[in-house]
Image (cartoon, grey):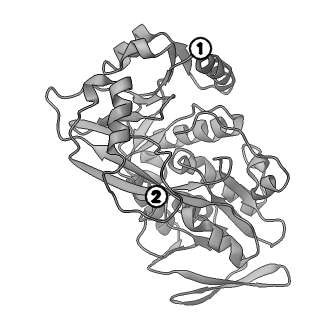
Amino acid sequence: MIVGGGVIGSSVAFHLAEAGVGVLLLERDALASGSSGKPIGGVRAQFSDPLNVALGARSLTRYADFASRPGGDIGLRRVGYLFLLPTDADVELFRHSVAMQNAQGVPSRIIDMDEALRLCPYIDRSRYAAAAYSPEDGWAYPERVVAGYVTAAQRLGAQVRTGCAVEEIVVANGGITAVVTSRGTVSTGAVVCSTGAWSERIGQMVGVDLPVVPVRRQIAFSPPLSPRPPVIPFTIDFGTTLYFHNAGEGLLMGIADPAQAVGFERGYDETWLPLLHDSAARCCPSLADMEVERGWAGLYEMTPDHNALLGEAASVDRFLYATGFSGHGFVQAPAVGEVVRDLYTGRAPFVDVSPFSADRFSRSAAVSEANII
């Protein structure tokens, strides 16, 4: 049984069903109604931690082949990711990351500001020492990914129940025996938790600590711009976390608001726009006064070190978890589906995910990741 019908849960459902495992996917609302409802999601392999690079690179390969497996047009645009680096120290940090990424086959590189300006003519080159660029990164549409995975999983025999909330997980003799839902009790010997920002509660049902807290993130869309924007990379100011990229005939912009309190508030408001405009005035002055036509708000599922919780619990037999991606769930979803499939079926995953074990915090083994938004 998989709990959570977002991009992680749907990927797990597909990969398990493809492996011949009987699958029941539960979602308390509609599919992709949580964080996976974000209109556009970035995909990249530019990270500073080797495990994040491996998951991102594997997922990029799978997204590129999505039309043939599992099937569907996800609107993938491989426009690249461009990290703008304000200081020499930032450049040195990214040089080390780029070397490690290159060793894993990622074609990232450090570029000068002349090249960065050609890639993204909006930026104020005087504010940056250099940039990091990888041409194979980009963005796609999360809801289409969820639909593609779920459709294929159902074709392979998986069952899906929406509007079905988990109320209790029954544990006896160290193992799971059933799940009590708002639509009845289901016997099962295995549960995969992929409920994102709501995962802590699911973990508590079986006595497993999943330290995930919800934090609202908001994005803004411009109206169609004239002249129409050129095709630009997914561009990020590493100093402020401001990011922007194409969206239709306009642009999408966002930023991590440090004043945003922890909580399940998902309503969009405009209180964060002054921060956005102030940061844009420094990074890309011509966009500082960009009109906002509409916005979107959703939840990041944050862990203490801003890295995923991925593995199988030691204290409860067959309780697996794939959650807490801290904004990188869509980036890593295809690879995570493969990993959970292999953990469940007893195969060795393509990469060792033990550093992302949920118990790492009790062992003072937090993972450091610098390239976060």
Name of the residue lying farthest toward the left: 226
Q: Which mark is residue 174?
A: none
Q: Are marks 1 and 2 in contact (CB under 8 Å)?
A: no
Q: Is residue 260 above or below residue 222?
A: below
Q: Is residue 250 left or right of residue 307?
A: left
* Residue 70 spot, x, y in % from top left: 48, 53
* Residue 144 image position (x, y, % from top left): 38, 54
**Tag shown at residue 35:** 2
How many marks can you see?
2
Mark 1 Cα shell of 10 Å, populated few (<14), some (14-19), many (≥20): few
Q: Is residue 27 left or right of residue 303?
A: left
Tell me the distance, in whole angstroms, between the alpha carbons under discs 1 and 2: 35 Å
**Quadrant of the image occupied by residue 30:** bottom left
Secondary structure of the residue carrying numbered label 1: helix
| Residue most extreme to the bottom | 184
Q: Quadrant of residue 97?
A: top right
Residue 143 visible in image: no
Residue closer to the observer: 273 or 156: 273
Kindly identify which numbered label has been placed on residue 88: 1
Residue at 38% x, 55% y: name it: 297
Disc 1 marks a residue whose amino acid type is Asp
Q: Nearer the viewer, residue 226 or 4?
A: 226
Q: Which of 361 and 159 lies nearest the eye of the viewer?
A: 361
* Comes first in the chain, label 1 or label 2: 2
Residue 349 image position (x, y, % from top left): 74, 49
Find residue 307 and report its horizontal and vertical position in percent. 65, 47
Tag 2: amino acid: Ser
Q: Quadrant of residue 148?
A: bottom left
Residue at 68%, 20% (x, y): give it.
Answer: 96
Q: Quadrant of the N terminus?
A: bottom right
